[in-house]
C-alpha cells in the first residue's frame, strides 16, 4: 500500500504540524496601572496626614481620662510651652483673651471651650488662662490631654 505525500502528513506521522492561526484570549489582568495609582494615593495621604491636625502643635500631657463626647463647635484655647496663648490658630495677647472669646461666642457663655496646654507650659500660665475663662462667665471649660498616661489605680469600668 502506497501513501501519497499528502496522506503522510495528514495521518499524523508527518514532520510538520499545523499551527492555529488564532491565539487564545489573554486572561491575565495588567496590575501595573493599579499599582501606580495606589502608590500615588499612598504618597498623597502620607503628605496630607500631618496637615490634618488642627491648631498649634503641642505636646499634650498624657492622663488616664477618657475622651469627652462630641459637643457643638467648641472654641479652642492653646497654651504653648513658652507661654504664648492662641485662640484657635491665632496668637492672642493674654489681656485680650476674654473679650475676644466672648465676641467669638456671640455673648453665649454656654459654648464649650477646650484648653490645650503643652505639657511643658508653666502651671501658672495655664491656671491664669483657665481663671480668665471662668471669670468671663464660661461654664463649660475642658482641659484636653492625650490618653494612655500612667494609671492611678482607679477602676475604669465604674464609669
Image (cartoon, grey):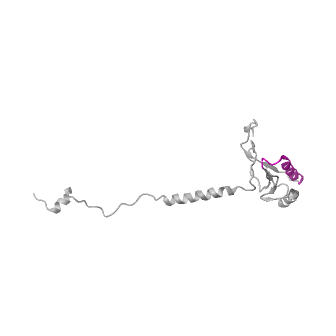
- As drawn, 143 above or below 92: above
Q: Most extreme residue toward the front, as rendered?
A: 82
Q: Is residue 46 left or right of residue 67?
A: left
Point 54% across, 60% down: residue: 37
Main SS, magenta region, reads helix
> Between residues 77 and 7, which one lies in front from this camera angle?
77
Q: Most extreme residue toward the left, as rendered?
A: 1
> Between residues 65 and 117, which one lies in front from this camera angle?
117
- As drawn, 4 above or below 65: below
Point 68% across, 57% down: residue: 51
Q: Which residues are magenta?
A: 118-136
Image coords of residue 47 (percent x, y): 64, 58
Image coords of residue 127 (percent x, y): 86, 48
Image coords of residue 104 (percent x, y): 83, 60
Q: Most extreme residue toward the right, as rendered?
A: 135
Image coords of residue 135 (percent x, y): 90, 52
Q: Quadrant of the C terminus?
A: top right
Residue 127 magenta-highlighted: yes
Amino acid at each position: 500500500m502506497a501513501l501519497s505525500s499528502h496522506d503522510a502528513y495528514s495521518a499524523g506521522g508527518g514532520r510538520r504540524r499545523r499551527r492555529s492561526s488564532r491565539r487564545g484570549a489573554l486572561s491575565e489582568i495588567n496590575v501595573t496601572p493599579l499599582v501606580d495609582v495606589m502608590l500615588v494615593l499612598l504618597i498623597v495621604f502620607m503628605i496630607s496626614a500631618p496637615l490634618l491636625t488642627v491648631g498649634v502643635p503641642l505636646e499634650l500631657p498624657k492622663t488616664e481620662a477618657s475622651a469627652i463626647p462630641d459637643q457643638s463647635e467648641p472654641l479652642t484655647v492653646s497654651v504653648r510651652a513658652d507661654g504664648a496663648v492662641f485662640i484657635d490658630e491665632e496668637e492672642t495677647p493674654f489681656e485680650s483673651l476674654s473679650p475676644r472669646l466672648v465676641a467669638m461666642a456671640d455673648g453665649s457663655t454656654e459654648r464649650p471651650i477646650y484648653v490645650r496646654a503643652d505639657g511643658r507650659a508653666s502651671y501658672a500660665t495655664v491656671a491664669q488662662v483657665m481663671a480668665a475663662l471662668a471669670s468671663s462667665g464660661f461654664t463649660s471649660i475642658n482641659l484636653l490631654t492625650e490618653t494612655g498616661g500612667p494609671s492611678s489605680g482607679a477602676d475604669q469600668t465604674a464609669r
